[in-house]
Amino acid sequence: MSKTSRTAIVTGASRGIGRAIAVALGGGGFNVVINYNSNAEAAQACAELVKQAGGQAVTVQADIAKSEDHRRLVDAAMETFGGIDVLVNNAGVAPKVRADLLETSEDSYDYLLDTNLRGPFFLTQQVAKVMIEKRASDPVFLPVFLPDNGGPRPCIVNITSISAYTASVNRGEYCIAKAGLAMMTQLFAARLAEHGINVYEIRPGIIATDMTGPVKAKYDKLILEEGLLPIKRWGHPEDIARAVLAIAQGALPYSTGQVIDVDGGFHVRRL
């Protein structure tokens, strides 16, 4: 496998939004480390799609909730492709049971926070250190006050949700985790800017995935009949993937800590 192309780690890449991101990056010529938790067959199918799109891929099993698993992702990127240029924190879980806020269990809270917030935090910490080490030895690195001439900067992209600011009282633990991930974006953006590493938050709206499948009828009515969104359609994983690819290719070099809404206009306040 080539060690000259840029390399991205995409967590939760075996299906849904993560798979679309991995394939889009493959189409952009990236090497992609495809993380999955349990479905090896789906991860391998994603790897084939990445290769068909023009990239290289390797699949790596790792439970993002477990810090001890993070090393496998980092090692796979370094040993197979020689570096890490992009980290996409996409892996996430929904509550197993949507319970009223007053009935939320500690087990559900811990399950959501471990996978959706704690895991991404410590994975980002590990990857950032690798990026900093490479950046420090890069002969084309320029101080942050000068324009870049060495190609796109390394970057970290966190996939959050409109639930970062939209209260759903039957899945409060999910909202809290996404709100925390939004603040995590700001923190790492501030900390890593001096090293020439940009950090972004992509905030999806209502996206057609297996996670939203159980509430399809509800959102069909809200979107198609009741005008919830200015853009009257469901979002698709590819909508998120296009935004990630633009960032990874260096389209926003003078932005960091930026929130990019990919939500059909949900965030627009209307009277």
Image: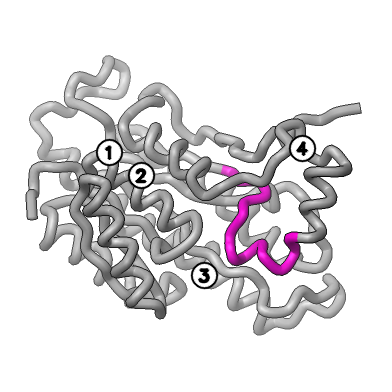
Q: Residue at the spot x=27%, y=61% of the render? A: 47
Q: Residue at the spot x=19%, y=43% of the render? A: 6
- Looking at numbered disc 1 in the image, what kind of residue is underneath it? Gly
- Looking at numbered disc 3 in the image, what kind of residue is underneath it? Thr
Report the disc number at residue 115. Answer: 3
Report the disc number at residue 229. Answer: 4
- Looking at numbered disc 4 in the image, what kind of residue is underneath it? Leu
Q: How crowded is mark 4: few (under 14 residues within 10 Å), some or many (20 or more)?
A: some
User: Coloured how?
Assistant: one colour
Label 1 residue SS: loop
Q: Residue at the spot x=34%, y=66% of the render? A: 35
Q: Does the magenta stretch include residue 210?
A: yes
Please give the count of numbered marks on the rendered protein: 4
- Looking at numbered disc 2 in the image, what kind of residue is underneath it? Ala
> Label 1 belongs to which residue?
28
94 relative position to 132: left or right: right
> Label 2 belongs to which residue?
24
